[in-house]
């Protein structure tokens, strides 16, 4: 059975979110949702997430899953907000525990902050199969950008997170804690071993302002193998790692990495309110 796929573009972070639904049962999953965040004021707003919710309500869908491909460093997840509004189970790859442990130390989080992934409703193992209504989905562990990255494989298509980008953008950075360029190369090759017509749904696209064609959200295995500027056919692992390492050394940190990570390792929930009724994030000095 063919899935219905609706994409949503979050311009603030160049992020694509998706609603994947089974037309027969009207069950759906939300993938990589986003909140809006004003760094200058600390204001969190839900405009982007509300657009997704409005579509789900208009289509009379039932949310079964709220899926994350990884703990994003460039936007705040809308998972917790959407669960409260629409229901569903929040899920991510099991290696989120490694990410939580690292960043609990980086941010010196509260002693009772759990690093067992219990903030999420379900932790996927590699090759685990689950359902969205009658649609079957296989989870692929695709680390490299982060240790916890996963991709979601369905019949003829994959939601790849940050495992690979559009051909003109290449590949994701590997210099975050736990990132590994060798692992990313192997993960990309795992995806590019799928049939050439397999569609790859992006989590991001960074089309330049002068581009004739705006941001794109889907490509194919065949297109990536032929044209991806970092990992097309013929690029060796050694050459990729050398390129990726040199490139990462000069990339600036994502603007929202400090607030985003603190929220996203909590499955999109804000830190507990303090005695004055306000939630706070931490700003570590001289860490990055």
Image (tube, rainbow, N blue to C red):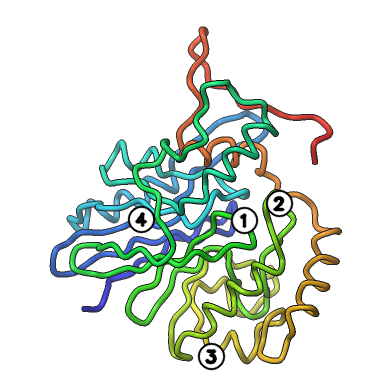
Q: Of circles 3 and 2, which is in front?
A: 2
From the viewer's perspective, is residue 31 above or below residue 4?
above
Q: Which residue is mark 1?
A: 146
Label 4 and label 1: CA atoms lie apart by: 21 Å
- How many residues crowd around disc 2 within 10 Å: few (fewer than 14), some, or many (20 or more)? some
Question: Residue, x 28% and y 62% (percent of image)?
Answer: 130
Q: Which residue is mark 4?
A: 30
Which numbered disc, 1 or 3, marks the residue that appears first in the sequence? 1
Q: Secondary structure at mark 2?
A: loop
Q: Point out residue 127 in the picture as x, y percentages from the top left corner.
A: 40, 67
Q: Of circles 1 and 3, which is in front?
A: 1
Q: Which residue is mark 3?
A: 222
Q: Which residue is mark 2?
A: 176
Confirm or deny contact between disc 1 and disc 3 (CB under 8 A): no
Q: Point out residue 213 in the picture as x, y percentages from the top left corner.
A: 59, 79
Question: Residue, x 20% and y 53% (percent of image)?
Answer: 62
Question: Residue, x 27% and y 46% (percent of image)?
Answer: 88
């Amino acid at each position: 059975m063919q899935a219905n796929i609706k994409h949503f573009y979050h311009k603030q972070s160049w992020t694509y979110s998706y609603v994947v639904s089974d037309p027969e049962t009207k069950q759906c999953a939300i993938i990589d949702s986003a909140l809006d965040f004003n760094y200058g004021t600390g204001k969190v707003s839900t405009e982007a997430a509300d657009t997704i919710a409005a579509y789900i309500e208009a289509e009379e869908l039932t949310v079964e899953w709220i899926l994350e491909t990884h703990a994003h460093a460039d936007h705040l997840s809308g998972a917790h907000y959407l669960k409260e509004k629409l229901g569903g189970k929040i899920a991510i790859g099991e290696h989120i525990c490694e990410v939580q442990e690292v960043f609990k130390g980086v941010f010196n989080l509260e002693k009772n902050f759990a690093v067992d992934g219990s903030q999420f409703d379900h932790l996927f193992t590699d090759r685990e199969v689950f359902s969205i209504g009658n649609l079957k989905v296989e989870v692929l562990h695709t680390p490299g950008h982060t240790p916890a990255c996963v991709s979601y494989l369905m019949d003829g298509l994959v939601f790849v997170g940050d495992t690979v980008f559009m051909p003109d953008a290449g590949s994701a950075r590997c210099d975050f804690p736990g990132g590994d360029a060798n692992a990313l190369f192997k993960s990309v090759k795992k995806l590019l071993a799928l049939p050439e017509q397999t569609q790859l749904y992006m989590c991001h696209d960074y089309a330049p302002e002068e581009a004739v064609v705006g941001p794109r959200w889907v490509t194919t295995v065949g297109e990536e193998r032929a044209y991806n500027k970092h990992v097309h056919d013929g690029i060796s692992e050694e050459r990729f790692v050398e390129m990726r390492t040199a490139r990462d050394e000069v990339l600036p940190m994502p603007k929202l990495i400090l607030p985003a990570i603190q929220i996203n390792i909590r499955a999109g929930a804000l830190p507990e309110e303090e005695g004055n009724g306000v939630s706070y994030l931490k700003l570590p000095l001289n860490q990055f």
